[in-house]
Image: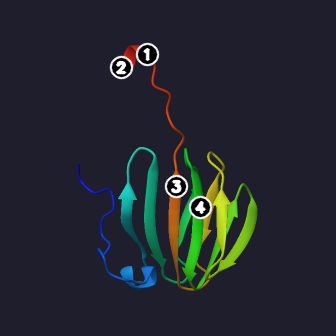
Amino acid sequence: MANPLKNTPRETVFRLTEQIEILPGQVVSRTLAQNPALSVTLFAFDRDEEIGTHDSEGDALVTVLEGTGRFTVDGTEYTLTAGESLLMPAKKPHAVFAPEAFKMLLLVVFPQREIRKDEN
């Protein structure tokens, strides 16, 4: 079975903020793990970049690693700085905006799908 964690150094102390680079005029992402139950992704936003309003089937936990990010969840704005986290509930519309360049870690936990007896 392949290791579900990727794009990270093994048996080495490292800083998440050094695993992704802020690039001019871009939103950069780096997937660290992804499967049907979980997604872990690093993001780096240049100033004034954004991810427009969308929703997710899973609960999304964001932690700002560097800089400041603005998150809008179901119409309410939250400004987070380094070290702060926010849980964005599943199926609620949310968006991300960078008033300044920033980096964040996104952890999405998807609901477990029930397996019907006839699927076994």
Return the disc, 3 or 1, that comes first in the chain's sequence: 3
Mark 1–mark 2 CB contact (< 8 Å)? yes
Outermost right residue: 76
Give the residue drawn at x 32%, y 56%: 4
Between the C-alphas of marks 3 and 4, the distance is 6 Å
**Residue ID for mark 2:** 120
Q: Are marks 3 and 1 in contact (CB under 8 Å)?
A: no
Which residue carries the number 4 mark? 61
* Secondary structure beneath label 4: strand
User: Which numbered disc flags the more N-terminal residue, 4 or 2?
Assistant: 4
Q: Is residue 46 left or right of residue 86?
A: left
User: In this figure, which residue is indicated by the disc labeled 1?
Assistant: 117
**Pair 3/2: label in front:** 2
Q: Position of residue 101 (x, y in %)?
A: 53, 85
Tell me, for residue 65, which label it has, or none.
Answer: none
Query: How far across and down, in percent of the image, does residue 71 sit?
Result: 65, 68
Q: Assess whether mark 4 and mark 3 are in contact (beta carbons under 8 angstroms).
A: yes
Q: Is residue 17 above or below residue 104?
A: below
Can you say whether 91 is above or below 6 in the image?
Answer: above
Q: What's the distance in space between the residues labelled 3 and 2, CA to CA?
A: 27 Å
Type of amino acid at the residue the image marks with label 2:
Asn
Disc 3 element: strand
The tag earlier along the polypeptide, 3 or 4, is 4
- Of badges 1 and 4, nearer the viewer stands 1
Q: Which residue is mark 3?
A: 108
Q: Is residue 20 visible?
A: no
Whichever of labels 3 and 2 marks the residue nearer the N terminus, that label is 3
Seen from this angle, which residue lies furthest front?
11
Q: Residues within 10 Å of mark 2 (few under 14, many from 20)?
A: few
Furthest-left residue in this view: 1
